[in-house]
Each structure stands twice: as C-alpha cells, then as structure tokens.
Image: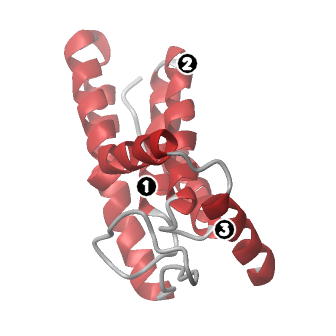
Amino acid sequence: MKSADLKLLRWMRTTGHTPGMESAAQALGKAGNNGLIWFLLGVALALLDPSRRESWLICAVLGPLAIGLNYAIKLAVQRPRPVLEGLPPLGGAPSSLSFPSAHATASFAVATAMFRVDPATAGTFVVAIAIALGRPYLGMHYPSDVLAGAFIGVALGLIVPLSI
C-alpha cells in the first residue's frame, strides 16, 4: 500500500502541472483552510433559505468542527507529510502531520450534510473532490490521506443531526 501511495503521489506531483492548474489548486486549498469556504456557503444558504436556516447553519459549523476532529486523529496517528526529493510541496500547512487530510474531511462532511438538506446541492461534491485532489497534486498529502479524510467526512456528514 505504501509503495502504491508513493507512486500515485509522485504521479500527481509530476502530471498535469501548469501555472494555471497550480494556481487553481492553491486557491482551492486556501478556500478550504479551516473549512472557510464551507462555513461561508452554509451561512449564505441559511440567509437565502430561512425555512431550513438551522440545517444550513449546522452545515456551516460542520466544516470547522470536522477540522478539529481531524486534528485529533492527526495527533493520534502522527504521520508526517510527504517528502519527495526534487518536488517540494507547493504550499504551506499549519502542522507537519498528514493523516488524514483535513481539507478532504471538512469538504466531504459538509458536502454530504448539504446534500442531505437539499439534493440540489450535489454540485458541492465537485468542489469537495477538487479541493481533496488538490492536496496530493500540491504535494501536501499522500493520496491515502485524502481518501481517509473523504471517508471520515462522508461518515460525519451522514451522522450529524440536521433539522430537516
């Protein structure tokens, strides 16, 4: 598994890299920091849809809460971020811990919860996938970090109580 993870990471770090793609992945990464994009989207939906305001506000706080839970898992696992000789990461991180990806956890948690509130928000999964794939593309995470984060996020999004 470790060998395949490393091979896939190296492939993601060396394939499809253009200044525009790297800038887009970095921008998505910044938007996903601390679940910010998900918090702002949840608040916006709460303002636009008063009949489901409470559910949208739960979605808004789920992103930052998922980041906190994710950090507790990182502390328990203690997996260092990837280091590829000649391929430095194309971004910074608040910690040196890699597993699981907080961006993937928060993104999939909120996308799943939002879909539960209103299936018309299915497009949030496209954003979640883009944010998650950007992490190994930028060299910030192993692909398995992202996969684990996505699974944890979906589980959180399914179990969080919503006022529907």
Q: Disc 1 or 3, which lies upstream in sequence? A: 3
Q: Residue at x 24, y 33 (%)?
A: 40
- Residue 100 position in % (x across, y down): 51, 69
Q: Which residue is mark 1?
A: 103
Residue linked to disc 3: 9
Q: x, y (%) of residue 95?
A: 32, 78
Seen in the picture, residue 45 relative to 131 is either above or below; the reply is above
Which comes before the other along the chain, label 1 or label 2?
1
Left or right of 69? Residue 126 is: right
Q: Residue at x 61, y 63 (%)?
A: 13
Q: Residue at x 24, y 11 (%)?
A: 48
Q: Amino acid at mark 3?
A: Leu
Name the residue type under label 2. Answer: Pro
Label whose residue precedes the other's in the sequence (2 or 3): 3
List the residue tagged with mark 2. 119
Say whether residue 92 is left or right of residue 116: left
